[in-house]
Amino acid sequence: MTVDLELDCRGMLCPLPVIELGRRYAEVPPGGVVAVVATDVAARHDVPAWCRMRGQEYLGEDTAADGVPRYLVRVSAPG
């Protein structure tokens, strides 16, 4: 899967990873993918919840090269 924007949120605590996602996802055109790399375990619940609230598509979780969880979001449209 091609990632259009990867957000390095390592070391950020809740709610900072989803705040960063909210600030930056509009940089990616509709259909593009944003990856949120986060060490905070709350991101596992926060990113999918953010997607539901914002009408974006949560694609699931994989791992970054260093083994840190990476949460994938397909951008539907800004807003």
Image (cartoon, rainbow, N blue to C red):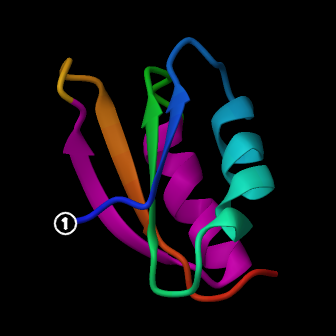
2 horizontally vs 23: left or right: left
Secondary structure of the residue carrying tag 1 is loop
What's drawn in magenta, residue-wise?
43-64
Quadrant of residue 16 within the rendered picture: top right
Quadrant of residue 30 within the rendered picture: bottom right
Q: What residue lies at 30% left-to-right and 33% top-to-bottom?
A: 69
Q: What residue lies at 66% left-to-right and 51% top-to-bottom?
A: 21
68 horizontally vs 47: left or right: left
Q: What residue lies at 43% left-to-right and 43% top-to-bottom?
A: 44
Quadrant of the snapshot with the C terminus: bottom right
Q: What residue lies at 64% left-to-right and 36% top-to-bottom?
A: 17
Q: Eyeballing the image, is 65 above or below 61?
A: above
**Residue position for label 1:** 1
Q: Decide: few, some or many residues near mark 1? Use Cα within 10 Å; few <14, some 14-19, many ≥20.
A: few
Q: Eyeballing the image, is 45 above or below 57?
A: above
Q: Name the one closer to the observer, 16 or 42.
A: 16
Q: Eyeballing the image, is 21 above or below 76?
A: above
Q: Residue furthest top?
A: 11
